Each structure stands twice: as structure tokens, then as C-alpha cells.
Image: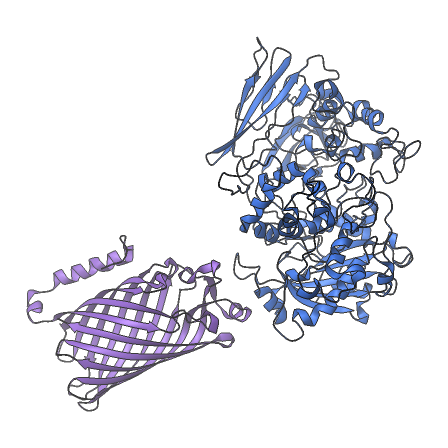
Amino acid sequence: MLKRADPTPGIENFLAFALVTLLALPASALAAKALRFSVNASLVTDDNVNKAPVGDDVREDTFVGVLGGASFVQILGLNSSLIYRASVGIEEYQEFDGLSNASFSFAVDYKFRFVRGFTAPGFTLTASLNEQDFDSDMRDATTFGLLAVADKRFTDRLATAAGLGFKTSESESDVFDNDSLRVFANVDLVLSERALAYTTLNLVSGDVVSTSSPTVDIIAAADAIEADDAFGGRDTGQFAYRLDADTTLLTLGLNYGINQDHSLDASVEFLDSSADGGIDYERTTFRLTYLGVF
Amino acid sequence: MNARLHPGRRCALAAALVLLAGGCERDGAVEEFSTAIGISEPDSFLRYLDAQASLPAGNYTLVVGTDSAGQAGSFTVTATLDDGSTRSFSGNWTVSGGADATAAANPAFTLALDRPGGVVLAASSATAVCLYLLRDPNDSAPDPTVRSGSRYAPADGGCVDRIELPASGIASLAYARAYYAAIDPADDRDTLAKWLSFNGFDAGARGHVRFRDTRDLGYGRNMFFRVNADGTFAAYVDNFQVQDIPGFDYTNLNLDALVANQRRHHIGTNAIEYSCLDPTACDCLTTPQECFVKFFTFLPASGGVQRRTLVQDLDGRGEKPMPGICVTCHGGETPPLLPDGRFANDGDVDAKLQFLEVDTFGFAERTGLRRADQEATLKALNHAVYCTTPGADTAACATVGLTPPTPPAGDWPGYLALGIMEGCYGAAFSESRYGGDDGECDYVPPGWRPNPNTGSPPAGADQLYLQVVGPHCMVCHARQGSNLGTGQVDAFGADGNFGGGDDVADNTKDVDFSTWAKFVAHAADIERLVFEEGRMPLGLLNYNVFWNDPNKPALLGSFLPGFSHGNADGTVNRPGAPVARPGPSRTTTVPTRLSAAASRFAETYAWTVASSPAGSTPTLSDASALRPVFDTDRDGEYQVRLTASAGGVSDSALVTLTVDSTLSPAPGDLTFDADVGPLLTATCATANCHQAAGAGSIAGVPVFWNAADQPNGTADEYFREVLARVNFAEPERSRLLSKPSGNHHYGGVVSGFDTADLNDRDGYDTVLNWILAGARRN
């Protein structure tokens, strides 16, 4: 469900593309369950939703997110496949309405292995396109991403993955025109038949957008700065600004399987960002998610 | 509305000692400067009430001659008007008439000017061209074959192929250049380094303060000052402004940038001197009356040098030339340039130093920069300013090495400024802290304290002063006024009286607002300038602070008799609605031009004849024109209605034309030499009035209305003095008319100038018609 009555042309294009893709699917694919549907519902608390470096400017908020998606697997051969993924979602913030948004994304994964086997490494190349429509118009953006991931199972309890990704966003404002490059590593550890623990470490180099009262140091370091309507804008002296930063993101999570198709996931995410001019911020989010596939 | 020509930066004026710097032109780099704000926009600060346009509105005849007669060839003349638009005039000579504006063989063209202003005429030809700009005496029916009335250019009758007449006689680069040629003829101070050395800063500053002024210019200000052994005072201030966020450039960031000394936010340096014209010839200890205030602005460093600039943009609303931008709120005057292009009075613009209103400043929370840490230095600076004010305590000034001046007759008395300063620092500057114990100066001059016995000042006048007049008007107005008139020269009294004169009747002439009576005597002008035109409060921050608090405009309106900009719910309307101004009512002949040029915020105009004598058939040449021609076939009284509109909002006003076909001379034939000059001499240069000597002469009277009493005794000087009091944009607001018709004039209503009496306004109509017809010399 899109939040706006007038979805942007980008979303319309995605919807049309997704519809065409679904219509083009052979009936056999549906029968073989190559097409799957999923739904996620999350409750997230964020102790620095504006990524502010200064204590007085830090804002907390909670949001509810719902994401519905569909994926289709196209087998290319014994060791390769294509996965088409499309999703729509909304996020509704409790306090800062401007951050509430609707999104649509489409992605294609190309998965392949050089050899077969349970512990054989796998590789994934992903291209994605995401369209987000915020209540705060300046945030409206189209994001294009490329991702390369290598994964490997070591045992039936331990799996790892590592990757390299690039993302670029074109938004309604200079501030939210962002580029970033990231590397990450992930470890999944099966704790029991139903429980799985995981941790992910992301190292991101590139643009971050913070919102706070500007300082001369921020202005000197910022590549772009504009009044942020999501946090009161000029009336409250809150400005969004884009900085070139190095960001470390550590996620610790626990996934509990209710059954084969439904699970609950709890995670905590620690973020530490250091930008030009010594402008740093920290952020912690807690996330509780229900995941279902059909 | 006028188009915005160029984006700019920002301005204001108010409580601080020194004005600010902005991005500007380099000295001498170009002839034009950018101006962003038109006259018909709210908060059009420092668009002078009378900008002294070079040319009145009307039709002009451009004659194109050659340097010698009998030549053949072709030419093109380009006329560039104030709004940047151009017109081209092309033609040729078969046998030219030579350097002669009246020669029929020289082609002539009509150039219409709908509004007062200026023009640049540039000729292009293989032949040596002589340009002449004449005013067509028949404004209602232009005829380029009529080549009389030359007053405008070239002034010396020579042969020029380029004529430059500035849109404003006091807001031009030529004015700025003339100013510095007067006060710094040898360019001893054309860079900050030279200025510092000139003023003794090589030996260090006496004081250094850092703060942000929140009500004046909004910058982070890094200010230094010193008092020299010869009694001169000098101060300069580095201004810091963070301009990276459009529309958010007057915040504490400016102070942060100053504290961090981030030079990329240094937008310039202002400097101010209180000194003699020639420091080698006098000093301010023994001859303080010869010392006056001078203004300098230096650009940010380029190649390590901060150069003096001729223009600055203090508020992002367009560049404005020096020194007018500083002079206005330092209580000075902007006299027209002399005919030879020199600055009048050797550059003494009669400006005053401003003292620092410490309780309006922001300070950094850092040791050494907090207010308490800087209080003593701030007081030292204010103490020096106090001692440049007439009437300051001599003993108190001796302690800081200064001698207060004694103002000559007609000069600024200073008592109100002294009262305010002593109200904030105690008598003779005895308090160590601005505002006393609480650090807030809530001083109310005696003349503003309610008097329940007489009802004047009325109840609440003190609150009006504290909330509106004090913070928004007094910075400028306390530096206005003269010591003429009874009661004006006395020391500032603590008993509520300003001396033994009739305070209410006589002390309402000046605009220094030292008393409620003076203030309310200007109620109509206050309402017009604040609520109708939006020109006051002067200065962007000052204006915004005033209008952003709805209580302030409402409070002010509630004290203005006949206030008409209020609403039933107690709110008041901001300036910006159309205001119809059809020009002054008058007795005239026909045909005659009407003009809506003085209207404000209007986009369209509609003229209608509202009433006319029975049997007459009045006509308007173009009922929607800015300057239509009115004509009729019968004498009598006509009322014409102007409706000015914009954005679906309209305003209407009537002008009364009393048509008298026997009027002689006809308005178009009036000249200064034959009519206006003799009239003023006969009417005004009389005993107890505007004459230099003889029975009843008044020391300090600002102008003499005869040629003999001019400095060199010439008619040219007399004419110039008269023109300096003519407002081509709004003729009826010319001081030449407003004073004798009784507006804040010590002489009251002068016979022949009583606009309320149709039988006693012939002099008024003569002068008015002369101005409307272009104020011809002969």
C-alpha cells in the first residue's frame, strides 16, 4: 500500500514492470513455488533518528514498518539462477511524521557457484532500484545499488557471508543525493532447531545525512545543507547536511522460527559515524520483526 | 513593482557603533553597482526618502549635434534607463548644425521618463558627436522640435558624446568617490593597514571586544578601538557572517565563526573615525568642534590586503554606496554634491557615533568572551562615545582623554543621546555595568513618562517607548534634531522638562522623538512609513523583530491618532498592499500630466474623473497609464480618482485639480530665476527667517533663501540649495513645500503656502507646479 494517492512516476514504472514480470511467469513456475510472497512487520526504536552529533539536538523516535514482497526464482542451470524481487513497504514514525515513507523496490540477484556442495562457496551479484516517497519531500529519492556477496557454510550451524556494495541516491534535494561504498561481513550461527543468532559488521565509506543545529564546523565540512522540514526546519533551526563519513555498523540479532514459514527476529544495531571536521555521531536501534513467507 | 535586478547580500542599521561590511565592488572597478530592492517593496531600507533623482519624470528632448557645423554622417545613441532597459536612437546628418542644441539641422528625439531617475546616453558615430538632453517644456504634448529649457546635460554647455545622470544624487559611486576624495584626498586610508597606522593602532588598541549584535546587523563583531593623545577616537570591527545557508545568515553561527576566527566567514571590516579633516592642523582636545565622524569599509583580504570599498551590501538586499548607508543611522545628512563634483562640507556629514547597547548583544560562553569578562571594555568604548557627544560631563571625559564638543547653533544638541547613555550607565558614567545591577537598560526618557495630571504623555507611553520606540526607533532618531527652537539647548533634565520653553508647542519640530509630544506630532508620517510603505523600522533585523512580534505593531498603532491600518481583531496590516497616490492637488492649467508614480505596491492603475463642473467635458489620454494627460474645456474644480491595484487588492485616492486657464505664468513656463527664486526670497528671507544677517536673523538656520547670503553670493548656489529640497518622486513631500505649509517648521504656515486655504496657497501652487514641470532654472 502506497501512502500517497499520487505515486511518483518512478513507482508507477516499477509497478508496471512488476506486473508485466508476474504476467510473464509461466504457470509452471507458480506451481513449482518458484514464486514466493513474503511479509515483514517491524517495530523499531531509534535513539538518534536524526543522526545528530550534538546532545541537545538528538531526537528519538519509534516507527512501525510493514513490507510486502514477492520473489521469483529463475533457474539458469545447475549452478546459477536469477531471483527477481519486488517489494512495497511503508514506515510510519510516531513523532517525526516527515520520516514516514512509502517505498517500492525491485532487485535482481544473480546467484552462482563454481562447484556444488553444502560447504561450497556461493556468490551473488545484485542490482537494485528503490523508490522512496517521504512525507518530507526533500527526502524523496531513487536509489540504485550494486552488491557483490560471497557466502560459505562451514558447518550446518555456521554460515558466513561477505560482500561489497555501492549505492547512489538521487533525491529532491542536494542534501539527500548520496553515494556510499560498503564492505560487510556476516556470521550466522544456528543455536537450535528454531533459533539462529547472527551478527553483521558493515564498514561504510561515503555520504551520511545528519540533522541538527548547524555549527561553523558542520558548515565547513558539509557538502550540502538545507533546512530539514522533518524536524521543524528553519523554525527550530534544524538543518540536514551531508557529510563524507566513515561509518561502522554492527548488528547483533536473534531469529526464532515459529514454523517453517514464520519467524520472529530481534536485533540491535550500533552505529558509529565519523565525518570530516571531527563530526561524529552514534546511534542505536532496536528492532523486533515478524517475518512470513507464503 | 520594480524588478529585482541582482541578488545581493544584507544590511541593517542600529545599535552598534560601527556599521558593517559586505561584498561589494572594488574601488573604481565598475561604474554600476547592483541593487536588489525596488522602492515599492516593503522593507526597502535605505531607499532614501528623497533619493535626489537627477531627472524628474517627464519628456525630454535628445539633440544629437556634432563638434563643428556642416558635417555629414550617421549615429546611434543608446539610452540606458534605471531599470537596465535601453532605447536606441539612430539618425544622420546631411549638413549638421554643429555643437548647438537649438540647431534645427541636428536631429532630435523624445525620451520619456515615467518616473524620476537617471539615464546614461552614449553615442556611437564616426563623427565627433555632441549630445544634449533638454527637458521638453510641454510635458503633456512632447515636441522634439522645441529645444528650450536645457538644464540637464551637459551642465557646462560643452560637447560630450556620453551623458551620465545617476538615478540618485546621493546613492551613486560618484558620491562615494567624492566622499573619500574629501576626507582622504591623499588616499592615506585606502587600505585597512594604512587606516590602522593612520589612527595609531600601530601602538595597539585600547580595547577589544567580541560579540554578536542581535538587533543591528547580526554579525559576529570583532571590535577594536583606541583614543589618541590628540583627542581623536577610532574604532574598527571585523564582521563575521556565515552565509552558507541562504536565509539563515543572522544567527549565533556568526559569533561562532568569529570566536573560531574562521576567516572565510570574514565579510569585511568597518572603520569609523572621530577626527579633524586634517589631523595635522587641529586636534580634538582643543578644537573638538572641528572634529567629525568619517566612515570606511574595507573588503576581506585579497592578496593580504584589505582595500577600501565604495559600496556595501549589509542585508543581502542590494549594494548601496558609502557613506549614505552609514550616515543615515548615525544621524547624519547626505548633501548633494557640489556642481564641480566635490563633496559638500569637506565630507562632514554631521554623523554621530553610536554607543553599544550591550544588553542586545550575544556573547560566547568562553572565558574572556563572556559579557562579564568584557563589561569593563565595553564601558570604556561607550565612555569614549559618550565623550564625543555635546554636553557630556567634561570631568568624566577628561578621565578618558576626550573633550566633548560644544555644538554651534543649528547643530545636534545631543541631550537625548546623553540622557539615554547616562540612563544606562548612570550620571557621568558612574556605573560600572551597562544597565546597572540587572544588566538590562530599561531607561525611559522623562518626556515619555506618563503624566496622569495632564494626560500627556498618556498612560502607557512608557511601555510604548520600552517596547517599540526605544528598541526600534531611537538608535537613529536619538541622533537627529537640532538645538534650534526654545527649550532645545538645555541640558537633559531629570524633571521631565527640556528647559523653559513651550515643550509641546515648539519642540515638536525635530524627529528626535525625545518626548512623546515630538513623537506623536509625526504620527501621520510614522503610519505612512511604518505601516503603508514599510520603510521603517530601518534595517532588516530591526524590521523583522518589529513585525515578527504582532504585539509591537499593534501597540504602536494604538497610540497613533487616526490609525487606519488596524483590524477589528486588534491585528494590524503589514505593508505591501497597494497604495494609490495620484499626486498633489493643485491649481493648474490644462492640459496637464497626472502621475501615479508615487503609488506603492501597485501593478495597474485606473483613472476616472470623479467630479467636474457642469457642462465640462474632461478627458484622460489613457485611463490606465502611469502618467496620463488630463484635459478639459472649462475652468473649475475637478476631482480625479486613481485606483491602484495589485493581486486583486485595490486602493483609491482623489486628486483635486483646480483648472485656471488664466494662471500666469503657466506651469510649464515657471522658472527658478523668474518665479520661484524671487518668490522664496520675498516670502522666506525675511526678518526672523531664512536670511543670514540683519534684523531678526537666526543663528543656525539651515538655509538662506536668497543668493546674496550664499557662501559665494551666487544665484547658482541659491538654486542648488533649493533643488536639494526638492523631491521629484513625491513633489508634495519636498521640504521646499512641506516646511512653509506648516509641517514641523519653526516658522509655521507661511503666507501663500496654506494648503488648507484655497485663497492662500498661490505660492504653494507656484512652487509645486514648478517642481512638477521639472524645476527649470530658466
In the depicted structure, whether residue A260 falls above or below residue B639: below
Q: Which of these two is toward me, B318 or B130?
A: B318
Place residue A43 in its image quadrant: bottom left
Q: How many marks?
A: 0
Seen from this angle, which residue lies furthest right?
A: B694
What residue is rendered at 89% in x and 59% in y?
B285
Residue found at the far front of this picture: B453
Q: How is the image coloured?
A: by chain
Q: Position of residue B235 (x, y in %)?
A: 76, 62
Q: Position of residue A93 (x, y in %)?
A: 32, 65
Foreground: B727 or B135?
B727
Residue B82 x %, y %: 62, 39
- The answer to whether B259 is drawn above or below residue B87 in the figure is below
In the rendered structure, the answer to whether residue B250 lies left or right of residue A260 reads right
Could one spot residue A81 in this view of the protein? yes
| Quadrant of res B133 | top right
Chain appearing in purple on the rendered image: A
Q: Position of residue B140 (x, y in %)?
A: 63, 21
- In the rendered image, the quadrant that contains the C terminus of chain A is bottom left
Q: Is the residue B29 above or below the residue B107 in the image? A: below
Residue drawn 78% across the image and 37% down it:
B506
| Residue B141 in view of the camera | no
Q: Which of B685 and B76 lies nearest the eye of the viewer? A: B685
- Where, quadrant-wise, is the N terminus of chain A in this rendering? bottom left
Q: Residue furthest bottom?
A: A155
Is B643 positioned to the left or the right of B153 in the image?
left
In the rendered image, what is the letter of the chain coloured blue? B
Q: Is A201 displayed left or right of B313 in the figure?
A: left
